[in-house]
Image (cartoon, rainbow, N blue to C red):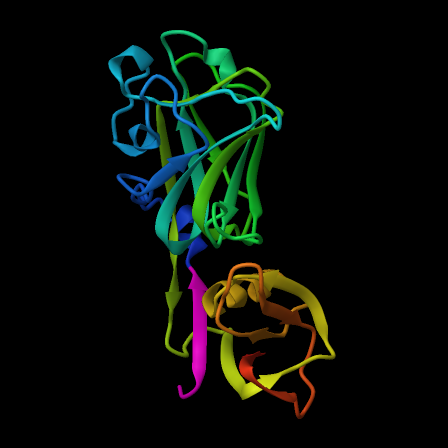
Amino acid sequence: MANVLECFLAASLLSATGLELPNLALNRPTAQSSVQYGRPSDLAVDGNKNTNDNAGSCAHVAAVPEPSIDWWQVDLQKIFTVLTVSITNRGDCCHERLTNFTVEVHTSDPMTSSNSGLQVCYLHEGTVGSGLTVDLTCAVNTMGRYVRIVKYNSGDIPLTLCEVVVKGAQVHNTCGVSPVVFTHHSTGAREPDYIVASHENIGKLDCAIMCLRKAFCNAFNSRSPSMGVVSCELLLDVAPDPVVNASWDVFKIIA
């Protein structure tokens, strides 16, 4: 279909078929807010579920002074519907450190983007047992590329993760056969009258995904992303003749 930007089929129904989904996080790029005892972030996605931190199999994030936010993240390298996140806790000691944390899913890298399309997959209250794995089911329609585990107000308690497994389904371009597609409504134009949300440093793909998540969004303005500059504007509707603006394009949902 000509002029179609993206047509999305979020294959979340796979979760109900009994099909074993692959671990999307395995050996993917990772990062964390700090490193303690020489235990880098990639140890949590190496496929080794040994719960003895002394064996060098667990990522270890150091506790930091205020603001006390410890985090670890993995880049899935593509947009997915994230279905479950499984986290294996340390078993040799100190299991109580993995407590009261949030699993976030971002469409853009939260390390570099001031607005990264944050969705909360799961808010875990309480402590994960010693050496145990907790399987968390994300909220419906949680889509993104970056999965981040965050301890807010962590104080002087570090964060240790022995293994993180992420399962989900890729968001596919169905080339016009999906029930929801975006058509390139206007080139070199911007709709100024129906803006309901704005986002900085967001590309067309992520902007489209954000629009699909919002019940009120039927279109969006988009331009090339740039740090600290609005590049995605979600729209309630589009006027017949958007305002000419060379740096912007307008995309509209068609059924």
Which is the main secondary structure of the residues drawn in magenta?
strand
Q: Residue furthest bottom?
A: 241
Say which of 14 and 209 sits in front: 209
Visible in this render: residue 215?
A: no
Left or right relative to 174: residue 236: right
Q: Name the image quarter holding the C terminus.
A: bottom right
In the rendered view, tell whether residue 232 sits above or below residue 106: below
Residue located 55% across and 49% down the image: 140
Residue 82: x percent and y percent?
45, 47
Residue 155: x percent and y percent?
59, 18
Residue 73: x percent and y percent?
42, 38
Visible in this render: residue 224?
A: yes
Say which of 158 and 212 sits in front: 158
- The image quadrant of residue 5 is bottom left
Q: Residue furthest top?
A: 93
Q: How many marks?
A: 0
Residue 214: x percent and y percent?
63, 62
Residue located 48% across and 50% down the image: 112
Residue located 67% across and 83% down the image: 238
Query: Where does the magenta region start and end?
Result: 1-10
Left or right relative to 136: residue 253: right
- The image quadrant of residue 54 is top left
In the rendered view, tell whether residue 229 sits above or below residue 40: below
Left or right relative to 77: residue 150: right
Residue located 70% across and 72% down the image: 195
Q: Name the image quarter holding the N terminus.
A: bottom left
Residue 19 is inside the magenta segment: no
